[in-house]
Image (tube, coloured by chain):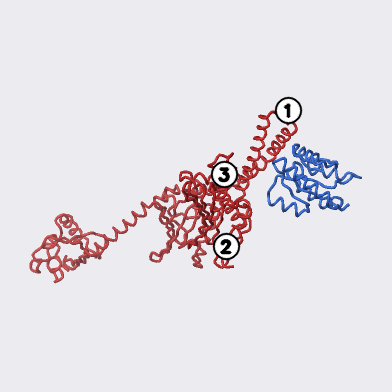
Amino acid sequence: MLITDSSGRIVLANTPAEALFGYTRAELLALSVESLIPPRFRATHVTRRQDYTAHPGSRVMGSGVELYGLRKDGGEFAADVSLSPLEGGYVLATVHDITRRKRAEEALAEQSARLAAIVETAVDAIITIDERGTIDSFNPAAERLFGYGRDEVLGRNVSQLMPSPYREAHDGYLEHYLATGEKRIIGLGREVVAQRKDGSTFPIELAVSEMRVGSRRLFTGLVHDISLRKQTEERQARLIHELESANEELKNFAYVVSHDLKAPLRAIGSLADWISTDQSEKLDAEGKEHLRLLIQRTRRMDSLIDGILQYSRVGRVREAVVAVDVNEIVQEALAMLAPPPQIRVEVAPDLPTVRAERTRILQVFQNLLSNAIKYLDKPEGLIRVGCVDHDQEWEFSVSDNGQGIETRHFKRIFQLFQTLAPKDRVESTGVGLSLVKKIVEMYGGRVWIESQPGAGSTFFFTLPRSGTTQQEQRN
Amino acid sequence: MLVEDDEVDAMTVRRALKELHVGNPMVQAENGEEALSYLRQPGQVMPCIILLDLNMPVMGGIEFLQVAKHDAALKRIPVVVLTTSDEQQDKVASFDLGVAGYIRKPVDYKQFVEAVRAIDTYWTLSELSQ
């Protein structure tokens, strides 16, 4: 606290004033008040002091004038000064060091600037509204997204950013929430539709949070444009649909084509047969041989078509999934194939029971055993059927001591219509193993081969144990 | 009676019957509708057996069965389905409609003759309802 006379000379100073400015009282009393002000403000201060002397009045603290004090050591500090006129032209000045407050204010200002910068530069639109739905803030991303300038929307109702019927309903939602506290979007976030200035609408993900600033309740909406995601999702759904219908068409195509090919094929077979019988006397040996080949090829085509039918039926025609005892299946397949007496078949005891379509499992063993028998070139054949119980799956195997297959053919043999022997030597359609592969893979299993040319082959396939149970295995 | 739209298939059946010396006369209808109108002519002599194809234009075999097996005058005539179809649902539908047999047309003519022979043998021995 200082008291000065009308010329600005310090006539009284208290102890806190000594501490504040770093002068002793004696020193202070020898100074003018301008000595306690940084030189750059001194000239103005003289003028202002003279004005004050002419028109004295109380000036309270923090009335907005930024002042600085100068200490004896040359250090400056932000000061808040209040003035009271005393009699005789004296003025009482109360000086407060407000450095700490200033710093706090500056920190606060910096923090708000930083927050504002985040909001200003955010990729997502950020919009705040008050409890009446009036837009309080609208960031640049919101301007870009909605096509409105900030000035066009501030103070307007947020419902103008929504298409009908949400536009009309929004005030009601807000009132309902304020009255009941029942949340529809606030604090939850969901996908809604928004409307641009030009009237076009687009899907957004909206997250709304509520905050209280003093007595005001504000709602902040975080708007994320999901047009692109929606488009991608729709495209994906469309592609999947197309794929499904293409697949469906393909399944039916295979069936219809095979079916319709049969009738003319049968006609060709019959007609060729009749020519060779009826015209037998007119035909020479070569003509008869050609007709024989023609009839034989007709039969081969018939088996091919049957193969396609069988192949296309897997997955298209569903049978009931039942507990299938593999022991029975293997015996049934062997009974159908009737291996010649020089081939010994060893079937492991206690093959499991699996849950599957019976016909499919029979087809798998029938084809694997039939191949093993067909390609056995040894005077004493041996075929073994086994099963290893893994944690997640059964691993079945059918091995033979036949001619074996070279590694380079391992992939090829599982492809449709692929055979390794000329068809005239071994009648084969090339459907069997591809059928096995299709069935096994339909059940989520794998099929592969290990083989040594000349020594034999082992075909392995797995079936997942999910859907098969120990209980059924014991039964 | 043969209900069949494919000319060569019809020829095949005729030829097989001839080869097997089956003397019975055979009438042919090209689809189910034609067969029904033939059978429903007043005073018509009923065939002792009907060989029925399934895939035919205008009225297929299954539709023919649906009508014939609900017609008091026709339902006792034995019907043997002679078709290309190996579809389970065709077989089930046929037997549900009371067919006497279901034979797939073999591509091989000689096997076809055997199929016709089996039909002839059975229906020569079997008693009929008339």
Rendered location of residue A116, percent (x, y): 34, 55
Work out whether mark 2 precedes mark 1 in sequence or the reverse, and give the earlier one.
1
Could you give the CA–CA distance between mark 3 and mark 2, rounded to whole angstroms? 29 Å
Camera-side mark, 2 or 1: 1
Horizontal relation, residue A99 to residue A423: left or right: left
Identify residue for label 3. Answer: A430
Instruction: Please provide percent x and percent y for residue A118.
Output: 35, 55
**Type of amino acid under label 1:** Lys
Q: Which comes before the other along the chain, label 3 or label 2?
A: 2
**Which one is nearer the viewer's eye here, A75 or B3?**
B3
Question: Is A418 in front, or is B36?
Answer: A418
Q: In the image, what residue type sits under mark 3?
A: Gly
Are the residues under badges 2 and 1 in a single subunit?
yes
Mark-to-mark CA distance, 2 and 1 = 61 Å
Q: In this view, does A295 lie to the left or right of A457?
A: right
Residue placed under numbered mark 1 in the picture: A282
